[in-house]
Image (cartoon, grey):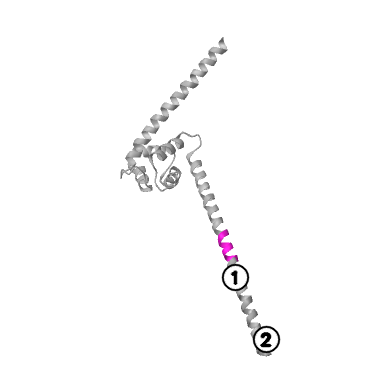
Amino acid sequence: VIVDVFAENREKDVLSRANDLEEDEREQKAVLGRIFQKIDTDNSGALSFEELMQGAYKVAEFNRWLRVLDIDSRDLEQLFRIVDADGNGEIDPFEFIEAMYRIKTTDSKTATKLVKHIVARIDEDNQELKASVQEALIEVKESTEDISRTLEETLTDHLREQERAMA
């Protein structure tokens, strides 16, 4: 009987905690929605990098969020790239709210996230560069083979002409 009471209390505690977390998430996302609207100075429904930078300085509530996340002006470009999940050069409200909430509520530090993002970008750029270099090497090889054949044909023709001239 005592074990059942403890189990019921633990289950109620877990449910209560889950409800508290959900309520906290709704509240924080509502705050982020208001911050987004304040930063979106041209009312386009999307943030440019310039708007994000200006918002970091002019919107006190956003500035406080950034301070809590240990993000300073030097980190804003990386933050923009992280939050711009689809990479289209703009941040829509969903991207902003979800990413900023996730960054704030995850256990790992923001600096670790920034570094991880930078490394992922470098790896992506490296893969693209590798593919470009491989394509260029194939083109160089084909060009070299063409030049070699042309030189061989020219040399062969020249030698034949010399042999005819000597004969």
- The residue labelled by disc 1 is 146
Name the residue at 54% across, 58% down. 132
Judge from the rendering whether residue 61 lies leftward or rightward of residue 130; answer left or right: left
- Helix, strand or loop status at disc 1: helix
Name the residue at 56% across, 60% down. 135
- Helix, strand or loop status at disc 2: helix
The amino acid type found where label 2 is placed reads Glu
Residue projecting furthest to the top: 1
Q: Badge 2: how crowded within 10 Å, few (<14), some, or many (20+)?
A: few
Q: Nearer the viewer, residue 57 or 101?
A: 101
Judge from the rendering whether residue 113 lies leftward or rightward of residue 28; answer left or right: right
Give coordinates of residue 116: x percent, y percent: 52, 44
Give coordinates of residue 117: x percent, y percent: 50, 45
The residue segment tinted magenta is 134-141
Judge from the rendering whether residue 165 lies leftward or rightward of residue 129; answer left or right: right
Give coordinates of residue 68: x percent, y percent: 42, 36
- The residue labelled by disc 2 is 163
